Amino acid sequence: MNSTVRAIFFDRDGVVNFRLVDDYVRSPEQLVLIPDLFDALRKTRELGFLPILVTNQRGIARGLMSEEDLHTIHRLLQSELTRRGVPLFHAIYYCPHGPDDGCDCRKPEPGMLLRAAREHDIDLAHSWIIGDSYSDVEAGERAGCLTAWVGPGGGDIDPDLRGLTLTDVMKSIEADKRRRINEWIDTDRSDGRE
Ligand SMILES: [Mg+2]
Ligand SMILES: [Zn+2]
């Protein structure tokens, strides 16, 4: 059966909330959401994608925070979205491991995306990952997703699209979807004429 469920996977730090200099977001006070997020989540749902968070949280492996701390931060994130009246993340996946743990979930490993695809029956080939790190784009490519880079930098990699802000990226994803629909309609019409 071909799945028609599509997702946009959001990296967290630097995409959903501001990254901290030389620290991990370890407590709710440190979680400052990027204002573009609210419209991005609305647009995600409007375009028919499930918004899913996929985040490496090495601070847990380093003993700087507990999984319970992370759950508290994610509960706050979701309740802030509720308060703002915008769609919540449909699911949240995190990797608590460090680079030497040999897990299959720490991006650039594609494990979180593959697990999400299994659990939510997602069509990865028509889903996106939005990230601000090389490892996000790499994880997306290895999972067979479309990839979007947000922010400056990343000149040495080749995502499917890039934008300076989350709003720019969402506009491009919308344009890409329109283009694909139009191509599909054109193909359908030309088939009909034969
Ligand atoms: Mg990031
Ligand atoms: Zn992991």
Image: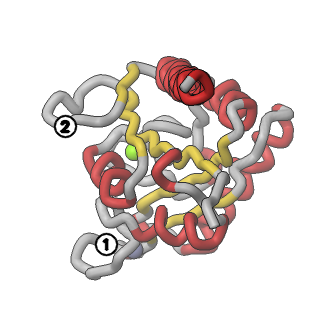
Q: Which amino acid does label 2 sit on?
A: Ile
Which labelled disc corresponds to residue 157?
Answer: 2
One can see residue 194 in this view: yes
Name the image colouring: secondary structure
Structural distance between the alpha carbons of marks 1 and 2:
23 Å
Indicate the quadrant where residue 150 lies. top left
Instruction: Identify the residue at horizontal 52%, vertical 21% (top origin).
Output: 179
Q: Which amino acid does label 1 sit on?
A: Gly
Instruction: Identify the residue at horizontal 51%, vertical 65% (top origin).
Output: 94
- In the image, 21: left or right of 5? left
Residues packed near mark 2 inside 10 Å, few (<14), some (14 to 19) or many (20 plus): few
- Which residue is disc 1 drawn over? 98
**Secondary structure at numbered mark 2:** loop
Which residue is at the front of the view, 17 or 137?
137
Image x and y of residue 136, in percent: 35, 49
- In the image, 49: left or right of 147? right
- In the image, 77: left or right of 183? right
Instruction: Tell me: residue 156, above or below residue 7.
Output: above
Image x and y of residue 59, in percent: 40, 65
Image x and y of residue 182, in percent: 57, 21
Which residue is at the front of the view, 107 or 80?
107
Q: Could you tell which of marks 1 and 2 lies nearer the N-terminus? A: 1
Nearest to viewer (mark 1 / mark 2) = 2
**Secondary structure at numbered mark 1:** loop
Q: In which quarter of the image is the C terminus?
A: top right
Instruction: Tell me: residue 72, above or below residue 14.
Output: below
Do the residues under discs 1 and 2 have CB atoms within 8 angstroms?
A: no
One can see residue 20 in this view: no
Q: Does the residue labelled 1 lie within 8 Å of ligand 2?
A: no
